[in-house]
Image (cartoon, grey):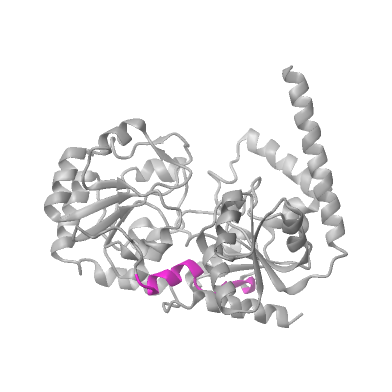
Amino acid sequence: MRKKKKIRSEIKKIIRVLKRTLIFMISHFIKKDKNIWVFGAHMGKKYTDNARYLYEYINANTDIQAVWLTKNKKVVKELRKQGLPAYSMYSKQGRFFAMRAKVAFYTHRSIIYFDLPFYAFTKKTKLVLLWHGIPLKKIGYDDKIFSFKDDEESLKYKIKKFKKERLFPFFNYAHQPDVVLALSTTTVKLFSQAFRVPESNVLITGYPRNDMFFEENKIVESKHKNKHAIYMPTFRNKGAGFDLFMQYDFDVEEFDRFLEAEGVRLYIKLHPFNHPTEALLRKIMFSDNIRFLNYDAIYDVINDFDILITDYSSIYFDFLLSKKPIIFTPFDHEEFIEGHRELYFDYDEVTPGPKAKDWREVMTCIEKFNQSPEWYQEEREQISEQFHLNQDGNSSKRVYEEVLGLLSKE
């Protein structure tokens, strides 16, 4: 029975690849329309990040036909309710727009999972990699721990991938962007080498999602507390329960009492690929001042938080635009850089804020910032200037104008 299922599964895979190859071939004979731009994000599953905010800007401010393509039927339904064009990337309409589009925007590049139906694109399609963060951690071809391991299994995988790309060229399109967005000269070289594109193809525009730092706050919850803090740790390779709380002197009752006394509510927003342990969920369940934030569009509300707490997440680079305090929690620094991800920079040199060794020290830092919000202000401003050339809320506009400029040269 299992053997039959496996055979059926393999046959389906072969049919799927053959269908996509046919679409890829047909797409070469279809004229690309400069007024059709398609967007996708987060492996094609979510409506989020730079692609979302640029898509909304294009729809609201230009005559371009901006279309969202996704694997998620709920996303299609929600966007259509708002009067925005969206289709399943596997539907006839989705494939039609993918084949007609002159420009495609995406946020992730994965060996397996794609934001968009790359099999519908040709070299006539402009691929714009928006990406999803300023790289503190090594990414793309620079990352030898997570993305490109040097073990035997990975080598076999690379050989398999190479064969696919030779037989079916569309498998490689996600790894060959025409343009990559950057935020300053500091990041141009990093993106160039990480994605193997010429530095001239890395454009300093800023991130569309960061335009939200220059708009009014949007948290709808009543502010019965004086301040709101958010804890956003970075992605961990292990998909198991997240437990950096229990390992580093996190006493829920003590922390809850401290937050009450300081007039602070703490929100916890884990990386989408990680989840809390059952033990942590049970402990926090009865807390009055600690909550999990289950909200994908974090940039809709990020500017409403008064303090960011993080370890190695690139969101702190973005949060610098708010000019508000940041507390760093590199509890597992050595373990992280050895087993999870290497860093591009010396951690202490680019993290403008106090470094807490455990949760007790986090409490001390919160108390200090409550008393003196200007603590580390000068350092934050220096790093912000280094990593953000433009600080004006017009990144979406710049991306739009840059892409128009590229199209006008053809």
Whole-percent x, y for residue 9 in the image:
75, 30
Residue 228, image quadrant: bottom left
- Does the image show residue 207? no
Whole-percent x, y for residue 339 in the image:
46, 40
Whole-percent x, y for residue 105 in the image:
63, 64
Q: Residue at x 43, y 46 (%)?
A: 337
- Does the image show residue 361? yes
Where's the C terminus, which quadrant? bottom right
The answer to whether residue 93 is above or below residue 167 is below
Where's the N terminus, which quadrant? top right
Task: Please indicate whether residue 331 sits to the left or right of residue 408 in the image.
Answer: left
**Residue 55 part of the magenta segment:** no
The answer to whether residue 235 is above or below residue 92 is above
Bounds of the magenta segment: 200-216
The answer to whether residue 279 is above or below residue 255 is above
Q: Residue at x 52, y 67 (%)?
A: 53
Q: Nearer the viewer, residue 64 or 117?
A: 64
The answer to whether residue 76 is above or below residue 17 is below
Task: Please indicate whether residue 184 sits to the left or right of residue 406 in the image.
Answer: left
**Residue 211 part of the magenta segment:** yes
Residue 300, image quadrant: bottom left
Whole-percent x, y for residue 219 in the image:
33, 61
Point out the residue furthest to the top here: 1
Q: Residue at x 55, y 67 (%)?
A: 189
Q: How many marks?
A: 0
